[in-house]
Amino acid sequence: MRRRCALVLSLVSLLATPAKAEEGHRTRVQGSATSTDSAQRRTLDQTRLDEAGSSDLPALLAREPGLYVPRLGGLGSYATLSIRGSTPEQVLITFDGIPLNLADGSPVDLAGLPLGPLQRVDIYRGRTPWGTGQVGLGGALALHSASTTELSGEGALSFGSHGYVGLRGYAGARPFSIALDYLNNDNTFSYTHDNGTAWNQADDFKASRQNAHSRHLHVLGRSHYQSRNLTLNAVYLGSQSTRGLTNLVARDRLEAHLETERHLAAVQGGYRLSPLWRLNARLHAAWSESLVSDPQSQLPLPRERAPQQSFTPGAVLTLEGRLFKGVLVPVFHLSTRYEGMEGAVVMDRTLSALAGELHWRLQPTLKLSTGLRGELGEGRQDLAAFLEFRHEGPWHQLGLSLHQTPRRPSLFERFGDHGLTLGNPDLRSEVLSALEVDGVVRSQWGPLFGEIELSLYARKAKDLIAFLPNAQGISRPENLANATLLGADLSLSLSVEDWLELRSTLSLLDARDASDIAARRGKRLPMRPALQSNNRLELRYPLPELSATQGALGLAIEADLLSANYLDPANLVQIPTRTIVSTHAFLRGESFEVRVSLLNVGNSQTQDLAGYPLPGRSGFVLVKVTP
Amino acid sequence: MKLSVCGWILLALPLGACSDEALAPSLNECEAHIAVLASDYSSSTLSTLTAEGEVCRQDLVHSGSRPLGLFTALSGDVSLPSHAVLPGQVALLDRYPNGVLTLLEASPGASPQQLALSPGFIGNPQDLWAHEGTLWISRLEKGPDSGSDLVPLALDASGHYALGAPLPLDAYADPGFDPMPTHLAEAFGSLWVGLSHISRDFSQTGPGRALRLSMGTNQLQVEDTLEVPGLQNCNTPISNAAKDVLVLICQGSFRSPRPQQLATSGLVYLSAPDSAPLILSASALGGPLGSAVLLDRHHVAVVVLGDLTHESPDRLLMIDLLSPELSPLELLRSQGPFELGDVLYLPEAKRLLIADAQRQNPRVRRLQLDTLQSPIELSPTVVSKTGLPPRYLSPIARD
């Protein structure tokens, strides 16, 4: 089974990059030893992460099929993730197996996560694996950091438009490694301000974005130990972020800002009990504190707010067997976690889950997997289940998945009496039922290698929770809506040895509100574009005089298409279709790399949300040195 | 996928096509007497009704009537003035965040006029009152240099409205609070301004207070304050057609626990400018007060708000303020809490209209009040094709 997973991983990696590109990079071992799982995933490997250059994690993920990443500004600005029409709250995000979702259930800010220390990103667009002790109704993003097996180091400096500066550093000597990631972006780009008067162009004016700065500092430390029967990993990530809170109306002398501090730690061990059974255990904890400061009360925020703290420790025990020479693989997960919030309101709860999976290789190329998971706590239970078939041949791969996944109402949704919000203790869990089919076909004709990956899905979401405001601006969550989501994700890759690579993705989504609310019935769910496409053509000219394996000069052009997208449930307000073209160039040698990017070449004035302009034409330079 | 090929082609087209031209009226087939604003607080739409409360024009303008710029054409937080403003015109107060006044003809043809009411800060305009060619706007929130005041708009040489020097009201707020003027009403020959009187971060509510202003040409002057001991958030003064009585609605603090809100909500009745105010506590009515309208000198129809926590409905009650015994008559009730919006009385037709934002079946409900004690509910009016629920009603002045 491990071999099978490795095969899937390597095939998907192949989709992203030619094999030789991996060579010569520093040696890194995988961040966390995940248990067996059959959930279909798409992996961004080191080469794809390096391709991001000066960019950040949200920009990288926005290119992937099935993912929609709206953001409030340029690099470093608040960004959330929607997978196949999910809400951001429904997406589980983990760092080395540590869930990052806060105790209050709010979405994870993707821009507040470091890109530099990452070795691999796994994207689960369908069912999410159960090994982290939590499930994501809408999908999951698993970030894996790198460690080292030898003395190594790396440093990178990047700078660019609108006050952008980035620093990344990495140093490792077995068994320890440390990484540093710093990003500052003043986001002082200009935009056209319409003064809120859509019918009156006479009062429009050019403005510069104010108080939109983002600063993120991350420090990662990790250690790894391995003997014949025992594997141990320890990881710590500390992060500090400062972010200006923007408001286009209150733009004069705006001072409001948000400060966030976060600490993650985990210890994970694996022990081979016998030739047939292996036990994995992980203890993890995440603590974060955020403080909003608005000294002039320029935004509708309390002037003096208590810091909001979230504490989410947890433990996961996984027992995995390999019976009948690996034909039958039973896996059991026992997990517990505590969720605590302190601030204006104090809330906490403890949840425990027991899950069992069975992976049965029916034939050498055909596998059946099934599982059942129950989560207990707060006097209620939630059940998740799946049934999956996977057929893998040398040049193709087919999968069928049926699953049901719940999302328990968050602490904030149930008990968040906060003046502006009222919790609803009677909320039911959201439940997603899904049918997903995926397939990969690859072929090689001499120097030409091609691969097509297609996924089709039908999802039905029941009892979706939404906050409904009243005339006084007070919101209360309700199990408001049902929704049906039909979609397809297509990914195409074509390469000619190391000379040329063409990658193209296409995501189609028809997400409809199936609730009985007159203004929503049958309408498209807002913030779910019907069509997304990313297309990238990269040309490389090998320069063996710089490095026999890596030396190259490369040029790339990238076009991102996003179809029109409604912003409101009544489908009155649309963000128009947009196409953003960007170009990149790089020069790579044995121990250095220089990347230059020109983003939004056409200087399109766009936005993902009304009132939050995105930057126009921007340039960035990255210089990386690997001693 | 459900989308047809045509559907995808349409999606690929520039989607600015959803403009006001698409909603351009074909015929001026009816006379608009009432403006109705429907909103789910994400987007808004404006419709008009006839003098009988029947549909005149649906969705005259809405949040998507113009291609999206930095802001939407109308935000999700739009209200209508308490009073008719300019003959044949509808005024829209786009409160937060846009802070914009939109004036448009209720009949077809003209393009809306728009003016930013608080450039550079969140003014959060609440109400509009016209006097001798000047439009006075109450701005709830305060900016670095102005705000929480009354600001005049006067026509400039080019025939467009322009902001004048505001009338600051800071002197009428207690320390730690902003005055937060909200609704305006004319009674006893004066302009009355209800103050929300809340701290700038909205966490605390000060004592109930309203201001009485003298009305001069292009200027207002505060004459007196009306203190309402025990009540808070006295933000809505209303008067009758003859403008010879005044009722002040105090809503209490919506951020307080309900019992506390209930204890500080109520109405104040002034039958003469110098008469002792009659105070009726909301506790006696079972819920904090919402919209209200005077049916004559002493009968008021008032919305008593339901409870979100217990999901109890709103009720529209009629109260005789001169009756020695409090015996309100329930005129109607909503399905859930916070669904009943503005109330509007049409004295000539003896008809009472109320916006009912029931999610599944939003409509304007109509009551015939030939005799006050025997209301008859008429068929309701569906005001928008969008399904957005009606919230605000405002009369349209006729020539």
Image (cartoon, rainbow, N blue to C red):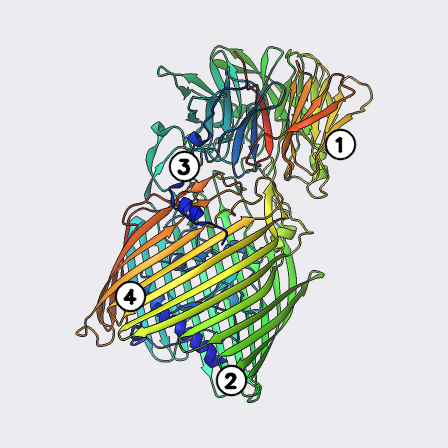
Q: Mark 2 lies on which chain?
A: A
Residue B200 screen position, x and y as percent: 54, 35
Q: Earlier in the sequence, mark 3 or mark 1?
A: 3
User: For the residue labelled by badge 4, is the local secondary structure a helix, a strand or a loop?
Assistant: strand
Co-location on one chain, circles 3 and 1: yes
Q: How far apart are marks 3 and 2 (CA)?
A: 64 Å
At horizontal 75% and vertical 32% (from top left) the residue drawn is B283
At horizontal 50% and vertical 23% (from top left) the residue drawn is B91
> Which residue corresponds to mark 2?
A230
User: For the residue labelled by badge 1, is the local secondary structure a helix, a strand or a loop?
Assistant: helix
User: For the residue labelled by badge 3, is the local secondary structure a helix, a strand or a loop?
Assistant: helix
Query: What label does residue B52 carry, if any?
Result: none
Residue A559 screen position, x and y as percent: 32, 54
The type of residue carrying mark 1 is: Ser
At horizontal 56% and vertical 72% (from top left) the residue drawn is A283
The type of residue carrying mark 2 is: Leu
At horizontal 35% and vertical 60% (from top left) the residue drawn is A504
Q: Distance between the residues labelled 4 and 1?
A: 73 Å
Q: Mark 3 lies on which chain?
A: B
Circle 3 or circle 4, nearest the eye: 3
The type of residue carrying mark 3 is: Ala
Q: For this rendering, which residue is in front, B69 or B144? A: B69
> Which residue corresponds to mark 3?
B17
> Which residue corresponds to mark 4?
A501
Q: For this rendering, which residue is in front, B305 or A172? A: B305
> Which residue corresponds to mark 1?
B283
Co-location on one chain, circles 4 and 2: yes
